[in-house]
Amino acid sequence: MIPAFRRAALALATASSLWLAGPAHAKGPDSLADLSAQVSDAVVNISATQTLETKRGKGGDAPGLPPGMGPGAPFDDLFEEFFKRRGQGMPDLPRQRKSSSLGSGFVIDAAGIVITNNHVIADASEVTVIFNDGQKLKAEILGKDQKVDVAVLKVKPEKPLKAVKFGDSDKARVGDWVLAVGNPFGLGGSVTAGIVSARNRNIDSGPYDNYIQTDASINKGNSGGPLFNMDGEVIGINTAILSPSGGSVGIGFATPANTVQPVIEQLQQYGETRRGWLGVRIQNVDDAIAETLNLGALRGALVAGVDDKGPSKPAGIKAGDVIVKFDGKPIKESRDLPKLVAATPVGKDVDLVIVRSGKEETKKVRLGRLEDGEKVASRDGGDKEKPETNSPASQSALGLELSRLTDDLRARFQIKDTVKNGVLITSVDPSSNAAEKRLQPGEILLEVNQEPVNEPSDAVKKIKALKEAGKKTALLIVANGQGDAHFVALPVD
């Protein structure tokens, strides 16, 4: 989900300035009128209506209704007496109200295929597409995807519609001019222009963030509209702004065309997405981890855990491996990997280049389907086996107070029964490096330098051995109470 301060306005990326100061060659285009005329008829307004049901309750007004419209309102006693005479109780009468929202979209097929944001039509019971000439058509939702925030609609026009094509968003450069057409505040077709301010932006809205940033003047109602290059090609779907106030501050984001096109094709063909899946949990590699694992450079995605039912398990992928190449493509940072995997066909055999114990190895993995993995994860309840309850005195290491897992401590820190191994962190010295790395009481230390620990004394001995061997850093695997693990590198001095 997009953080609250970033959700204040979800909209189309545009820019408010049509000129740049400086020498003549730095000026923008003299006019965008021809381009605007070329593409505007393919941009539409989206009206999404959601029907909400509320029921008459006992005492007080019905939720969502104006005061005086619920129980206790005038004539309610007459209705109650009417039902009593027939031996019936006062029924829970459903009451409906409608909530509407407006957004933008664009036609990509003259036969009636329209693209918009998923959040524009999410939970809508009725969607209407409104065209430049005033024509209104009811739309069918062919498919939608929350992860990249895109939806595919279908309308049935009497004659072919004006359509636009996608361009290659990878060719868009910082500084290139862009044009946006949308429906801000429900005003109808509005055209604005600006430049590409940055590429590959991560705004923590989902696993596949790589937004085009533009100096757009973005407002509510622009969501789902197209961002055009100067050739009239759609290079992005405008989705969000960064704004503490909810108004435009000139920082807008568009999902690149090359990210949404494969998703749109899947939604048209199957009505759902079919993404590739590795079955691993990953995290970023920092300088300390890179040094500890002998990577030689800051790169790759560190495997923090492997799904027992995922495709990576039989391929021999282990926690602590660093994936540096996927299907021939380098992984510069961890967020590169999910995007590459998701865009790869399910069932394809791919080569993973990993670094293990300082050496590169190649593993072949047949990709599973992400959606299947998510269904399995939601069904699994886990083993309910309980650990032994004897607990020796706690011990300290690296600013951490460590205790054996017991039933009492599990209950106190809400540790799931599926977390069977490791030692519990009961307190963290606020002046320690562990505190700087944000380790917290209630987390579980699973491994030290890729060796398991099941007693506090195990951890203390292993850390002492690292010091005696002249090592500067201890690589820990730490899990939260749900069992989700990550690596933390701590100095042993």
Image (cartoon, rainbow, N blue to C red):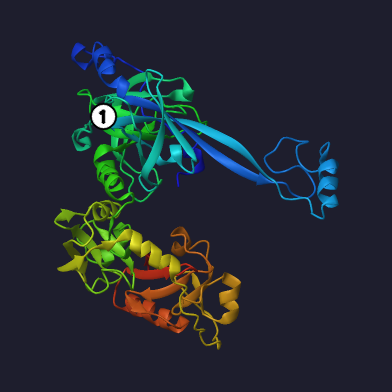
Question: Within 10 Å of the Cα at label 1, are there few (<14), some (14-19), or many (20+) other Cα atoms?
Answer: some
Residue at (34%, 75%) from the top-left corner? Answer: 467
In the rendered image, the quadrant that contains the C terminus is bottom left
**Residue 59 percent across, percent down from the top left:** 80, 48
**Disc 1 element:** loop
Left or right? Give the position of 45 relative to 70: left
Left or right? Give the position of 255 relative to 167: right
Q: Nearer the viewer, residue 290 or 97?
A: 97
**Residue 45 percent across, percent down from the top left:** 41, 27
Q: Is residue 268 above or below residue 473?
A: above
Disc 1: which residue: 110
Residue 126 in view of the camera? yes
**Residue 399 percent across, percent down from the top left:** 48, 69
Residue at (29%, 74%) from the top-left corner? Answer: 470
Q: Is residue 46 above or below residue 353?
A: above
Residue at (45%, 28%) from the top-left corner? Answer: 221
Amino acid carrying mark 1 in the image: Ala
**Residue 309 percent across, percent down from the top left:** 32, 72
